[in-house]
Image (cartoon, coloured by chain):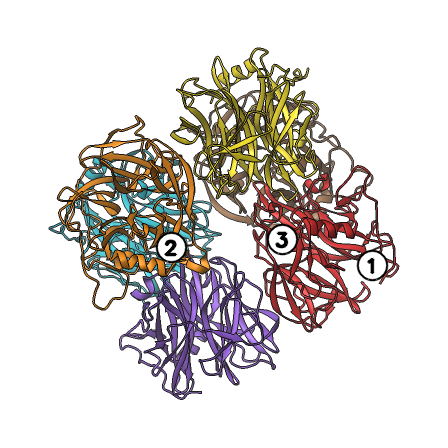
Chain colours: A cyan, B brown, C red, D yellow, E purple, F orange
């Protein structure tokens, strides 16, 4: 992997927050490529001497597709003007009505991409690339309806492990996080419920639905999982970010889970846009050694932003404020 | 397998219907065992010198569970007073909030049972037995939410094949039939859409949702699949029965599908009961050689009934009246 | 017109009801023609030396269409096995996704048929025949969505007049009766609201929606309009029949309107069927001279029945029990 | 009070049910008085040398009102043809858009009547009579929306006690039982939750809503409370009857509560009617000495029926099958 | 007509958009007249040596009405402080619960105004003026429920032609564009479906409902119709603007239709206001000779704004990006 | 009471509005205490030589609770970092799943606090304090579901009087204002409807639900009641502020009620936030002698703001613009 420096800003002087926003957010504008209506809910990874990413760019027909992009510094991105074309991986069935909300996860020898794939409704699409130039699509992991499929970056007991959130075909006013396993990235089973929405009276920001965010980060405490939580206000859904710590060997075992959110919609670009009050994390760049994480998130379903935090502080916060 | 004679009555003299009801329906009363509120949506198979079955008996607390039962003639049934207890099959995870709508399918050496299993909502439970005395539960096939999981009685390309209907956690006002494959009854993939609801203007009885019924029957024409279809009237869901013929080798390929229903709710025990206007097929006893099929179905979510037909006539009807 | 005797039975000895059911109801079975699933909500008129009718026969694919039929006595009907084929009347646009709930109205020289016509949703189709053999379709009267279009049998101020009920594309949980006028059966305007649903506390059987039933009958009191009213119970819609008296010259002026229903679902064939608790009137045969009316109605969206009453008593009842 | 013999039939020979139906049910027909569309959900008490009752008679305009009636044997009833007229009790505010589902409770010196009273929506109306000839109306107990207000026949700690079920203004897809206290039948407070709906997986017949039925019966075990429970099927609400035992001195303390129902809709007059599948208890006649209870209930929102049981057996059943 | 110069700004240097916003938007503030809460969704036309308009001004009771206004330059408007008073045109029926979303269309000798008129729900009101001082109201074109009635500025085959969108009585989660014809502005018929919502996967911004915007512009390519399209996000409806080209002689024949939107909510005054994310076009000022169009639109249901484009480029864009 | 000067700013020079905003709004930021996500819908009163208040501070788990705070000038507030702890008042039942939307009302000798209290859903909690240091909780006033309980600052006929709004357990798409009386702050009765939502066509800003705001102010005209009204737009609820004048002695008698709103969401902090377009008043500081009122309101469910007006002008406005 890359040893490039991840994006970073120190905590502002007047702040005591566990995580803080980049001061030049949003880093990617809604019109950053010619066809785009919005660029958000996207995934980045270290790649070669910089970074690569897979970006959700809805075009001006509001069709959803995913695009590759590259950056030297993780902040300034060159996103391809054409969406990713997939060749056949472990399937000839490349049908896809739409693709959105990608995640990218390096396992062993390649970059796996998972996304919300339109096959008679939303389900989890899987693909891979070695170089972000040539891409291969695999069998969908699950039957519809599903969203927020996120791979673990290591096999568990020799099997691939994927978090996901069973959904419906609409705006889905419910949703819990499950884990499933596969020996081969083709057949999936051993489905377990990992964590469910919180009671309204205990943690209302995550009482309507929750979904895995970035690829979990392996720490001494276990898997650090950033996730989004949703509350249904009288004026619509509001998406915030929390974090949980999953057992390293049995990731369906939740050790800790943040009762308060880490980040809630409060900046103008989070409060105003195509879908107001959405803060939706899909990726991190992080360095366990340097105790840093840069969290990439879509804001208001319109633009892409980044926030920062210290891994040790986040872990402490989750442990000390656990539901 | 058994060579016992399946239940049979000839078509009534005044009838030209493709399928006709047993004249002593219902064959199983709602109170047939002491604890039951209703016995319906149940599965029967030839077994030893008679028949065995797995029955949905909702008790008077309206808890749903499945019970084994036995019959010499397929009409008079002795149903155990206690529900099936499962030991561990390929899983230690035997959690089950409820069990309902079983199907039974003999493959190679054993009787596989699939049912709607309560694991954070409905999904497809799998179990097996060799003798209808000892039962073993396996991993759930899919993530919730799913219903109407029905196995094919032969492997396809060396893999188990299961039809199912992705659902939601309520009364599910939608629903199409999919097929999935597994090398080992544990991990499932290669999900394909088999058939969707029909347009209202072409076949309204199946315009709201459809679901596989009994285990498909292999015929020269392909797999004969009885299925239920639902129309949402202003006074609730109405369930009828139709049939489709699936390609023998590629069962996601629908060769024919009946535009008219084969059986719609019309008898008093189908029109009146806990849930009026439900005719829900879950099993057949059939003899390809004798050109006979006895279709077992739940009526009004209250009792169990049977209807008869000639396989050749049913196949002709489906081919000549295909959607 | 015909001078044939209309069907009639005297009021049962023990009854004081204003209207009473035919003792051999239903007069048309759901399976009266080979293709039918149900025959209901149909219209009859005097014709030649007997009667003719246009019948809603849903087939076993639950497709809705209208069929011509004939009877000597108004009770025993021969219904054609094939639906009506329409030629071009005042339009070449014969598109029709479905046809249901017909009414037949003789005006001047021909029998006009109106029905619920499927054109991107339900609207009012118009056709005519001189002989019930050859039929001609005209322009739809209105934009979708509309149902229960019923013509007045005389022109008002030289213009055709049609009652209708603006609707939606589903089961329509609302609905009032309007009148519109046309100089030529092609262009319609002068839309006026005639009567709206009643307050729940005053007449709950007609508090959810109402719709015109048979072609109104001209009496000395004005137009006698039988109409259906609907209450939304916790187990679905319940359809009853009431009557109103409209001003002869200004039929948007409601002179009287029955607070109690005249007929509510109470007979077994009204309480049980494809859609329980529906009593839906679409036609009358009547003789003002003999003071008799035979009201034809669909029962439980399954079969066709008839009820009787004396016109003078019905008029008195409506006047004495007016909302 | 009366020492008249309460209605009674012994358990049928072939039955092992805890409660059984009267073999001549329904005891009151829907058309028992001239104006009525249905007579159901009504209350009876011992009175003089026989019985008196307050009956819900919906008229043929489907207006809801309550009527007094009298019977020598508790089976054959003479119901007044005009609804109860109330004079002023502890209020001049006699506004009432409708009255339905009455209960009658003798306390100290008079018969208290509670009902669902229409005052800007449903709430609990209160009235009293000494003689079932003259009636007085009091202040509504609660703000809307509420239903199923049922008094305890003794004061608790010197205060009147009323069970009720907070509701909404429609068909109310939720509902739990609360208790409130009053020093004077005018001001109410000390509201406590008594019991809530049961989990679907434990007792589905009572998983949607529950409501108190007849006035509770004081036994050595505590207050025996019959109540209705509702499950929301895909074809509407289904109402069954269960029972609970409340602490004698602290009736918000539920000692036992039946997991199975005692009576579920199964007889034709319960399965078919204006609202199918409703079995709604509102009163008992009982003799603790003779160990008998006759339970009066509305069937299908259409007619009135009665069932019998032995108090000791019912208490045992509730204790042995407690949720 | 007027030969006054229409408002115009050249495309900003850095823009490649087909249409661009006026840099001093919004041109009319929400409080521009004393009574107003918001001024939006309004129509302007050339008039005398300047421009006249009909404006939707919701007052601070949030009552909806339409007001006349005048401008020399099309940017700065004097709007009357009192709403338009209508005299009788071809009707005495001037009932109007509310008036909103006006369009103005000059045909032959007068300015026709169409609007959403409250008559037992929304339908299409029609009026006319010669001088914007005296106004006359005609019969409503259609039965309720309807919105977005827009006249063509020339007769088709000697008949007036009106686009409209059948609706319901609420926020209408569906909606397609139809055309109807009238010989006399009083009776309407020959209703044809013009265009329907687009499939979600092809053009999601217009997948929930669509409605005609300004009066169509006759070009060499056919009628240029700007229209609004709506997507239902998890936080509400989002309104964008697209365009279609209709056949000159048969305007129900859609020749081209833009897959991408031309303008979507992105400016602050479009994203924030009484109803966020609404961009609703109701009028153009245009010069075919100069190849210019100024599009007037309501922003966030709060203020009025204008955007510009070159007709030839818009036509090319629609043709080259057709659905 | 305090004689401290209430906060005040004169009407801006260019304004003719009856009420106007403080120019440094919002006065309390969402993060004003360390744990808070938002601080809004809060109540203030004169206290000692300054002011005290009870504040709704949702924490970053979005748990709702109420906090005491103090201010010298009514603008700059010190809010305690820990929520109010209540001791036992007239009850030992201190159960409270959540507390929000407090009001504070001084009566005779103490400060009464009412709030939305979580007891099996929202109902009205009551407490009191003498010093804003020690707090005592009383019995809930009503059964659930209720919100916006507001006391009158004087007894009426020797009884406490409370306005409230019966609600449901969700976002409540309905709601009218009632009044109830109590001799002792424990038992409540004599419930009367005070005012209902306005018809859409007359005053749409208050057509969905209304609720009492601050404690009413006694004036020569009667009780001046500020209240919120809600309209359900296609993008959610919009909350504005109006006022009514209630009869001094019979406060269920509404003398006047503003047809226009006094304040509608228009400032950025009202239009953007956790719940956009909410302006929710909960308290006033006022001086009848000085003819001044400062209205405290929550903005966008995020921050706290204040607006000013002259009492005489507000009274005149309500009288001159009454519904």
The residue that label 1 is drawn on is C46
In the image, residue E272 above or below residue B307: below
Q: Residue furthest left?
A: A13
C-alpha distance separating marks 1 and 3: 27 Å
C-alpha distance separating marks 3 and 2: 35 Å
Horizontally, residue B165 falls left or right of residue F88, namely right
The residue that label 2 is drawn on is F257
Q: What chain does badge 2 belong to?
A: F
Labels 2, 1: one chain: no
Horizontally, residue D222 falls left or right of residue F36, namely right
Q: Say which quarter of the image contains residue A262.
A: top left
D70 or A261, nearer to the observer:
D70
In the rendered image, is residue A48 in sight? no
Horizontally, residue C85 falls left or right of residue E81, namely right
A297 or F40, nearer to the observer:
F40
Look at discs 1 and 3 and give the one toward the viewer. Answer: 3
Mark 2 surroundings: few (<14), some (14-19) or many (≥20) residues within 10 A: many
Look at discs 2 and 1 and give the one toward the viewer. Answer: 2
Q: Could you say whether the residue bearing mark 3 is in a helix, strand or loop? A: strand
The residue that label 3 is drawn on is C210
* Whole-percent x, y for residue E233 in the image: 40, 56
Mark 1 surroundings: few (<14), some (14-19) or many (≥20) residues within 10 A: many
């Amino acid at each position: 992997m890359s040893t490039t420096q991840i994006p970073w800003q120190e905590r502002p002087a007047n702040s005591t927050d566990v995580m803080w926003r980049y001061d030049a957010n949003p880093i990617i504008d809604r019109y950053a490529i010619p066809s785009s209506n919005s660029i958000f809910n996207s995934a980045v990874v270290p790649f070669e001497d910089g970074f690569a990413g897979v970006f959700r760019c809805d075009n001006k027909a509001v069709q959803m597709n995913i695009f590759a992009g590259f950056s030297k510094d993780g902040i300034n991105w060159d996103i391809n003007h054409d969406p990713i074309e997939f060749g056949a991986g472990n399937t000839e069935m490349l049908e896809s009505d739409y693709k959105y909300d990608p995640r990218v996860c390096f396992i062993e020898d390649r970059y796996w991409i998972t996304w919300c794939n339109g096959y008679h409704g939303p389900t989890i699409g899987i693909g891979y690339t070695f170089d972000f130039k040539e891409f291969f699509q695999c069998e969908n992991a699950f039957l519809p309806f599903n969203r927020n499929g996120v791979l673990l970056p290591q096999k568990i007991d020799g099997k691939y492990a994927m978090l996901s959130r069973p959904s419906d075909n609409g705006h889905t006013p419910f949703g819990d996080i499950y884990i499933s396993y596969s020996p081969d990235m083709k057949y999936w089973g051993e489905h377990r419920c990992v964590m469910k929405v919180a009671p309204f009276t205990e943690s209302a920001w995550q009482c309507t639905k929750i979904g895995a965010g970035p690829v979990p980060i392996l720490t001494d405490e276990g898997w650090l999982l950033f996730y989004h939580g949703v509350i249904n206000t009288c004026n619509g859904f509001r998406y915030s970010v929390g974090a949980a710590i999953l057992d390293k060997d049995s990731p369906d075992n939740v050790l800790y889970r943040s009762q308060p959110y880490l980040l809630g919609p409060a900046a103008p670009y989070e409060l105003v846009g195509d879908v107001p009050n959405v803060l939706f994390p899909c990726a991190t760049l992080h360095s366990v050694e340097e105790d840093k994480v840069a969290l990439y998130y879509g804001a208001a379903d319109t633009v892409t932003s980044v926030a920062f935090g210290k891994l040790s502080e986040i872990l402490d916060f989750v442990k000390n404020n656990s539901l």
